[in-house]
């Protein structure tokens, strides 16, 4: 088996590839649903219904998509510069931790500032915490050649333990009845509702604005150009006189900040406080979303809605027909792998004989 | 303080714990090492370990022998490896992303399978795991420590010289190292880079499956969620620490396990003077430190993470 480059990107394949990947994913997972003893057609119908079938379903999907857009952008911008940030999960938790530190300690009175200023401080604090958490690995990669994949992965575990420590110590909710739960942030600092009678909050708006902003930065600014050049070929970029190190470090700051904001959004928009199970792997799902979107910032929004829909839909399907919710994770993983193969096939042709 | 440490290092129980903690790391590190020496990064390890742990345990739970369970775990690992090889070697998909995708797929499939098989159980069902090899107690020096281990630990320890020998002294090992250093030269020698890399990834992933099986068939007697808990990533770091050498990988795993065992004991003895999370952070922090220390001297396999396509440069 070998690959042969296509002379031109196949136009039809650009459409067929994602469709084929989705059909393949649904077919594989249909086998799993059947294995669990549930009717396949009805299960998928329930999944779709639960994700997009009603106003309530849409609102739940959009709520779930909010952190996913941000972690997806975090992965997309970093991967664009070939900085493999697998640590969005940890950055998200540190962002959330910072949000509680600014908005929740001592009943929100830790900092004697008016609420609007404190709100901005909370956003900046969360972004900064996430950014700094990634700056370390990025710097180590640039200076010492330490593989950032492993270091960011390991930092995820440390971040979670840090959060656990804070929840046992200074941020413990005295009224938490022993649950590991932080003090709540000042209600004045919570995000407003974007949709009445739902959980959709202004964090979604923030995420969408940042997606458009990132798209503009990548397309239309010199920094965006340097980012793409460094990602395409760092050596060539250095020869051309581009500041490779600075570009990578700046990218790291942006990526970490985006993931940190995802954490702020969850605390200030959804829960109001921080728990250890706040994120069911949003950081890792962000990587999948970025890959599904081909690292395109606007594609990330679509990818996030898709993944959020699968997660929300699988929850409600699981309740109705008794298929384990882990099906959602399987669907997302199979979608990632088949999408990878599909995009490859738009650029290469497989020759089965040498 | 010094006296407690000395007492600790003198006790067989401590070293028994160290070897037990080290076993999955040794197996996993050897697995990563085989893949990476052939030029393929395999971040699927975390998921392959989950799948191996689950499949091996399920086989035993359904009434098969313990060694059948081990074989099943190895076979599941090999299957995952074949998928990773198909994607990264055959289709030259990004090795990072394919590996992470494999981790997600293998672990979510295992959890899904567990929930389908045992829908409403709150306490995990248990099996009768491997028993310690009490017969080894008579051996000089290491006897008491080895007698506290199970057969799988012995297998892991014996695999270290075996892998080293195969890598350094056999044509197969030479072929494997060659496709990891200079695939074009290997192709020039009439080797098929794709075949050698595929075999290496499958072999390495088999070991990762065994590493998972150790957790459910020897260290514990049940399958839990999150039971692998980053051990796979630690193995990836340990390979860098070991400069891609099996012997050093063993020492790295033992050193790591010593610190891990130490952290557990200190945690018990200090009795809450420090938050327990600090102790739990230690292994992960040490892995990062190991990466930093060794990074300058790291002699990566030259073709690591570089897909090879015949006729392309």
Image: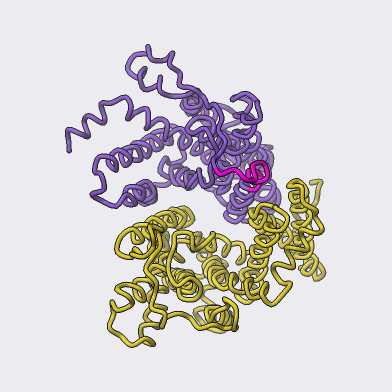
Q: Position of residue A88 (x, y in %)?
A: 49, 63
Residue under the image location 60 percent in, 83 percent down: A195
Relative to B234, residue B147 above or below: above
Q: Which of the pair B65/A192 is nearer the observer?
A: A192
Chain letter tied to purple: B
Q: Is residue B290 magenta?
A: no
* Residue A132 x %, y %: 38, 68
Numbered label tally:
0
Q: What residue is rendered at 53% in x and 68% in y?
A: A71
- Left or right: residue B153 versus residue B70 is left
- The quarter holding residue B143 reads top left
Residue A218 appears anywhere in the view: no
Q: How is the image coloured?
A: by chain
What letter labels the chain drawn in yellow? A
B117 magenta-colored: yes
Q: Nearer the viewer, residue B169 or A12?
A: A12
Give the x, y percent position of residue A8: 77, 68
Residue A180 x %, y %: 40, 59
**Image side of residue B305 versus residue B23, left or right:** right
Q: Nearer the viewer, residue A82 or A119?
A: A119
Instruction: Tell me if A98 is positioned left or right of B57 in this view.
Output: left
Q: What is the span of residues highlighted in magenta in the rendered image?
A: B112-122
Q: Quadrant of residue A291?
A: bottom right
| In-front residue for pair B16/B121 | B121
User: Does residue B152 appear anywhere in the picture?
Assistant: yes
């Amino acid at each position: 088996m070998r690959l042969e480059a296509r002379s031109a990107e196949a136009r039809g394949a650009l459409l067929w590839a994602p469709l084929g990947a989705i059909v393949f994913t649904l077919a594989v997972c249909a086998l799993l649903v059947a294995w669990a003893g549930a009717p396949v057609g009805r299960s998928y119908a329930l999944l779709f219904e639960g994700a997009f079938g009603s106003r309530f379903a849409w609102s739940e999907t959009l709520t779930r998509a909010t952190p996913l857009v941000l972690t997806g952008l975090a992965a997309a911008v970093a991967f664009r510069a070939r900085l493999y940030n697998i640590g969005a999960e940890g950055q998200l938790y540190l962002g959330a931790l910072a949000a509680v530190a600014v908005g929740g300690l001592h009943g929100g009175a830790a900092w004697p500032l008016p609420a609007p200023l404190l709100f901005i401080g909370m956003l900046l604090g969360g972004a900064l915490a996430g950014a700094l958490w990634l700056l370390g690995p990025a710097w180590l990669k640039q200076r010492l050649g330490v593989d950032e994949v492993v270091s960011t992965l390991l930092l995820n575990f440390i971040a979670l333990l840090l959060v656990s420590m804070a929840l046992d110590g200074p941020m413990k909710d005295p009224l938490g009845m022993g649950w590991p739960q932080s003090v709540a942030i000042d209600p004045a600092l919570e995000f407003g509702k974007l949709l009445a009678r739902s959980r959709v909050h202004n964090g979604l708006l923030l995420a969408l604005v940042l997606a458009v902003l990132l798209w503009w930065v990548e397309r239309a600014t010199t920094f965006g150009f340097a980012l793409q050049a460094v990602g395409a070929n760092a050596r060539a970029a250095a020869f051309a006189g581009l500041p490779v190190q600075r570009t990578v470090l700046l990218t790291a700051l942006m990526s970490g900040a985006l993931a940190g904001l995802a954490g702020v959004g969850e605390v200030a928009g959804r829960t109001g406080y921080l728990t250890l199970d706040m994120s069911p792997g949003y950081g890792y799902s962000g990587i999948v979303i970025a890959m599904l979107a081909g690292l395109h910032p606007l594609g990330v929004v679509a990818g996030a809605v898709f993944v959020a829909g699968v997660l929300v839909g699988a929850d409600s399907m699981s309740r109705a027909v008794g298929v384990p919710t882990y099906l959602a994770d399987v669907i997302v993983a199979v979608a990632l792998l088949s999408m990878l193969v599909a995009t490859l096939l738009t650029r290469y042709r497989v020759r089965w004989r040498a | 303080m010094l006296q407690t440490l000395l007492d600790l290092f003198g006790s067989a129980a401590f070293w028994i714990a160290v070897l037990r903690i080290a076993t999955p790391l040794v197996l996993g590190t050897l697995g990563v090492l085989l893949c990476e020496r052939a030029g393929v990064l395999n971040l699927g390890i975390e998921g392959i370990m989950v799948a191996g742990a689950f499949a091996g345990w399920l086989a035993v739970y359904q009434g098969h022998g313990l060694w059948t369970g081990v074989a099943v775990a190895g076979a599941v690992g090999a299957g995952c490896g074949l998928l990773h090889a198909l994607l990264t070697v055959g289709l030259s998909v990004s090795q990072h992303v394919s590996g992470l995708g494999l981790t997600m797929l293998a672990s979510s499939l295992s959890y899904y399978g567990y929930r389908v098989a045992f829908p409403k159980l709150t306490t995990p069902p248990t099996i009768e795991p491997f028993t310690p090899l009490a017969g080894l107690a008579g051996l000089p020096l290491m006897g008491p420590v080895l007698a506290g281990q199970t057969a799988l630990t012995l297998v892991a320890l014996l695999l270290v010289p075996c892998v080293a020998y195969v890598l350094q002294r056999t044509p197969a090992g030479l072929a494997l190292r060659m496709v990891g250093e200079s695939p074009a030269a290997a192709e020039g020698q009439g080797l098929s880079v794709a075949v050698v890399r595929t075999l290496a990834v499958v072999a390495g992933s088999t070991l990762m499956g065994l590493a998972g099986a150790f957790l459910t068939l020897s260290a514990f007697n049940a399958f839990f969620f999150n039971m692998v808990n980053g051990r796979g990533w630690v193995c990836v770091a340990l390979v860098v620490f070991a400069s891609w050498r099996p012997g050093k990988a063993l020492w790295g795993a033992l050193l790591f396990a010593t610190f891990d065992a130490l952290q557990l004991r200190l945690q018990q003895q200090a009795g809450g003077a420090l938050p327990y999370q600090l102790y739990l952070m230690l292994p992960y922090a040490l892995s990062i430190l190991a990466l930093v220390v060794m990074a300058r001297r790291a002699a990566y396999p030259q073709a690591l993470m570089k897909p090879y396509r015949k006729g392309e440069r």
